[in-house]
Amino acid sequence: MFTIFAVLFIMAIKDRKERDKLDRRKLIIESATKLFLEQGYEKTSIRNIADDIEYSPATIYLYFKEKDEIFYVIHEQGFELLGQQFTLLNQIQNPFDRLIEMGKTYLKFGVENPDYYDLMFIMRAPLAEIECHANWDAGDNAFQYLVRTVSECLEQQLIKTGDPHIISMSVWSFVHGLVSLRIRDRFKSLNMDDDLSENLLLQSLDYFMRNIKA
Amino acid sequence: MFTIFAVLFIMAIKDRKERDKLDRRKLIIESATKLFLEQGYEKTSIRNIADDIEYSPATIYLYFKEKDEIFYVIHEQGFELLGQQFTLLNQIQNPFDRLIEMGKTYLKFGVENPDYYDLMFIMRAPLAEIECHANWDAGDNAFQYLVRTVSECLEQQLIKTGDPHIISMSVWSFVHGLVSLRIRDRFKSLNMDDDLSENLLLQSLDYFMRNIKA
DNA sequence: AAATATAGTGAACACTGTTTAGTAAAACCA
DNA sequence: TGGTTTTACTAAACAGTGTTCACTATATTT
């Protein structure tokens, strides 16, 4: 009889402990995200995070195997954010219009969240082996979403014929090229007030989309 | 009388000293380039270079203000290399054919020299202020070469009309997107044997060029 | 009450880029 | 030739990085 209550009691404690553990993990992630968005990956050190949450640096290693593992969750946050903005575009019936808006959304995301973008698409891929299976799921999903939209465009003959994967790859490469050259200041050669530069990106996108139109 | 010879002698010594100084600078650059091409920027430390040339780390700072300054000359080497390969294409009369070959050359350069490519087009720009004037001259030249070729295509109505700067920006962004996603392993999602992947890049380029053709 | 499991940390390790004070040797001047 | 200055170099340190480990308190279990 007593043992039953005892067992329940023990389990309640264990539950609380697990909750606490998750809370502290969350604390680390939130601090890391905050610092990361302020200063980027390289400049956010484990000691910075430790100072911020008022724990010892060593404690962080009780919750994360390595620095990259912390930033892998931020990496995922980024994909969730971008995914959300893509989801909003589902309501656009015409797949070509949707494709155009996806492009605009992508450009906007990159320019407005350069640090997220860096982690998601520019940085040398961390966790090469470790979480390799799950690692690029987020990215794959987004890409598959693109492939589907492109396929719809092809079915409805809204764009010139071609292999949907090649086309998707091309679209992605194009917008990625725009964003990453912009983020890494390779466009500053000529003119380029900040406003102007975002306009140039949009004009380039428009040029690209006009060209693939059927 | 004697003084004349003495002055000549002194100057000869000074010349030799300057030669020596340049030699040692060159030694550092050669070692740095070697190590850089083996391991990339981040993994090449000042101490690595010092060990390699059998000098103290501090000595390197007598010849270069900071690590970035060493890699700025490698950065320039990269542009020279790419520029050489572009120059070979001058013999192609038809500007659109030339444009296509420029694209292929660019892709090939990026895939075959990922570390150079990284320094030239992906890495966060070093020397932000210091050599800002001269810093992107190399890159600007290459871009102006692109703009000229695009302009020729427009004049001869080989490609659809549009602003030459927007078109050039688009072409560059497109090939840069392909290369940078490729060398940062963002394409590994589907299939991708190494041979196959380079083929995909070329197919994408072909798709792009077909679309801008008049 | 004693034994054990858990959470957290100080201090260290092996690195990094960079600076500084000090040392030999070469060059200059008398 | 001898004394002074300039040059070339470096050992050691500074301040930072990611990461590990031996250790300590506290909480839980027996």
Image (spheres, coloured by chain):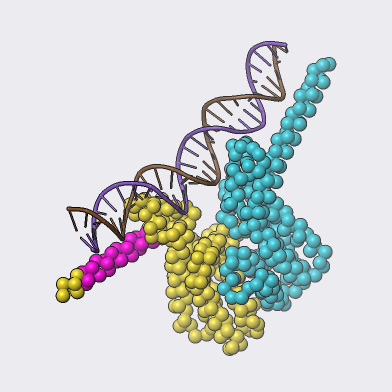
Chain colours: A yellow, B cyan, C brown, D purple
| Residue drawn at 81 percent across, 67 percent down | B92
Helix, strand or loop: magenta stretch? helix
Determine which quarter of the picture holds residue C17: top right
Determine which quarter of the picture holds residue A6: bottom left
Determine which quarter of the picture holds residue A8: bottom left
Outermost residue, left side: A1
> On the picture, is A60 further left or further right than B186?
left
Given residues B187 and C12, the one toward you in this image is C12
**Observer able to see residue A66:** yes
**Quadrant placement of the C terminus of chain A:** bottom right
The residue segment tinted magenta is A7-29
Q: Percent position (x, y) of residue B49?
A: 63, 44
Q: Percent position (x, y) of residue B39?
A: 62, 54
Above or below, comparing residue B46 to residue A96 in the picture: above
Given residues A63 and C22, the one toward you in this image is A63
| Residue drawn at 61 percent across, 37 percent down | B56
